[in-house]
Image (cartoon, coloured by chain):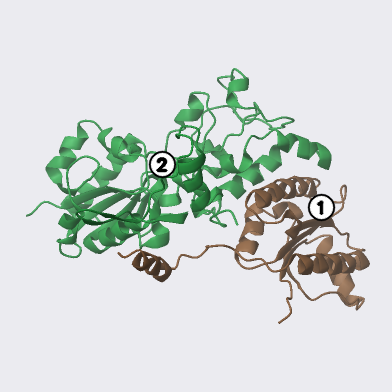
Amino acid sequence: MSFEPRIVGFLCNWCSYTGADLAGTARMKYAPNVMTVRVMCSGRVDPAFVLDSFRAGADGVLVCGCHFGDCHYVEGNHKCMRRIAITKRILKGMGIQPERLRLEWVSASEGARFQEVVDSFTEEIRALGPMRLKEWAFIPEQVEAAAAAHGE
Amino acid sequence: MAKPKLAIYWAASCGGCDIAILDIEAKILEVADFFDLVFWPCAMDFKYDDVRKMQDKEITLTLFNGAIRSDENYEIAKLLREKSVVLCAFGSCASEGCIPGLANFTDKQTIMDYVYKTSPSLEPGNNVVPQTEVKVFEGTLHIPNLWNTVRTLPQVVDVDYIIPGCPPQSNQIAAVIDAVVDILKNGKPLPPKGTVLGASDKCCCDECKRKRDVKKIKKFIRPFEIVTDPEICLMEQGMVCLGPATRSGCGAKCVAAGVPCRGCYGLPSNIRDQGAKMASALASVIDSIDEAEVERILDTVADPLGTFYRFSLPASLLRRVQ
């Protein structure tokens, strides 16, 4: 079976979500792999949202906000940029390719840009392959079996 | 009426929690008076078989400290769960993994290789590696198998309450013991299951008495690099202080002494990942909107992952390095 990337997209209410909406109303075709979550501001995207998306099975996370200078809350996107920089370091340290997280600025009028971002990110994640978390869940039976194998 | 029974166990831990229990000073006599201590391997001679012979739910309260990282830890965790009415994850190791949990940044094989093959304190050419099973003249001996991933107690068995801290502060332990005695003696109702005892819900900054103003940081520094100002917030002075992402309850003792919070009381309520929260807080105070400069400032944070997740890696969203 071919691999279809599952991508979680956090879009800011004021620019990027409207941009995505524009791509939709203009009937632009783009990859259906991004599941969007509307947030009030890209500055609202906590690193925990990104980690939680990966834990829940996402292969990639896309965060989109307003261009610098356009933020509805003046500097939410500045904070977002810094959060993404530090989150990429966390991902790298945790053994997850930082390329699986992408930050893009998409304004309300850039439907075509949203289309291009989603398409290229989907292809990038497709090339990286599926994400598998190691030993995340605790399965007592497996531990019991291992213990039994050791003769206990 | 027979005395209520108390058990204290250590799994993967340093023994500091046991010392912290003794740190309640004269109150320990009250504990010995009120409870029948049935199991405390750190302080008295008990055997696992003593516990195995007990009835189910015979122990009233078990304080379990230490993370779960071997078959033995897991077996005793299950055993004590069966035999106890109330099982309490005591201390940071049991509740979120703590320092032993940093092993989740590597794997079992790397640890074994370092400790038994390449560590500089070994004799050159050492090749003696512990086996889980060894035959000797008297029969076969078993050593518990070490796990690849360190787990917390609530991840492997059902836990009733959590007492955080590395170690839990003695005044908080004393307060918890008072509450337990009150419940058992006067029939007070138990707090809801899953309650965090001996700590509060807010973050460490809430207890910190330092002055806070606007934080704008161009370079992070380590505690040895400056003489700290005794009044101003340590983060404003440029140190990575885990106060914003750590539960209060300790009285902010480290911060009062000029040492940034290390995060031992674990994540506050409503937070799911201590390291991510700390990263988020840190990103807010960096004073730059230029990506290259932000990267340069982030480079000045020494060992970011080890710092953010020092006490909570096994309880974090990703659990271990992937």
Residue A9 pos. (x, y %): 74, 65
Residue A121 pos. (x, y %): 82, 65
Q: Considering only vertical position in the picture, is B154 above or below B304? A: below
Residue at left offset 78%, top offset 62%:
A13
Q: Based on the displayed image, in which of its 4 quarters is residue A52 positioned?
A: bottom right
Q: Nearer the viewer, residue B209 or B14?
A: B14
Residue at left offset 63%, top offset 68%:
A57
Q: Considering only vertical position in the picture, is B74 above or below A33? A: above
Residue B129 pos. (x, y %): 41, 47
Callouts 2 and 1 on one subunit? no
Q: Secondary structure at mark 2?
A: loop
Residue at left offset 67%, top offset 56%:
A96
Report how far apart the C-alphas of labels 2 and 1 lie in the structure: 41 Å
| Colour seen for chain A | brown
Q: Is residue B261 left or right of residue A77?
A: left
Cβ–Cβ under 8 Å for marks 2 and 1 = no
Can you tell which of label 2 and label 1 is closer to the viewer?
2
Q: Residues within 10 Å of mark 1 (few under 14, many from 20)?
A: some
Q: Nearer the viewer, residue B319 or B29?
A: B319
Q: Which residue was labeled with disc 1?
A: A72
How many marks overall? 2
Q: Based on the displayed image, in which of its 4 quarters is residue B157 positioned?
A: bottom left
Can residue B127 be seen from the camera position used here?
Answer: yes
**Quarter of the image where the C terminus of chain B is located:** bottom right
Q: Nearer the viewer, residue B7 or B233?
A: B7
Amino acid marked by disc 2:
Gly
Q: Which residue was labeled with disc 2?
A: B165
Q: Secondary structure at mark 1?
A: loop
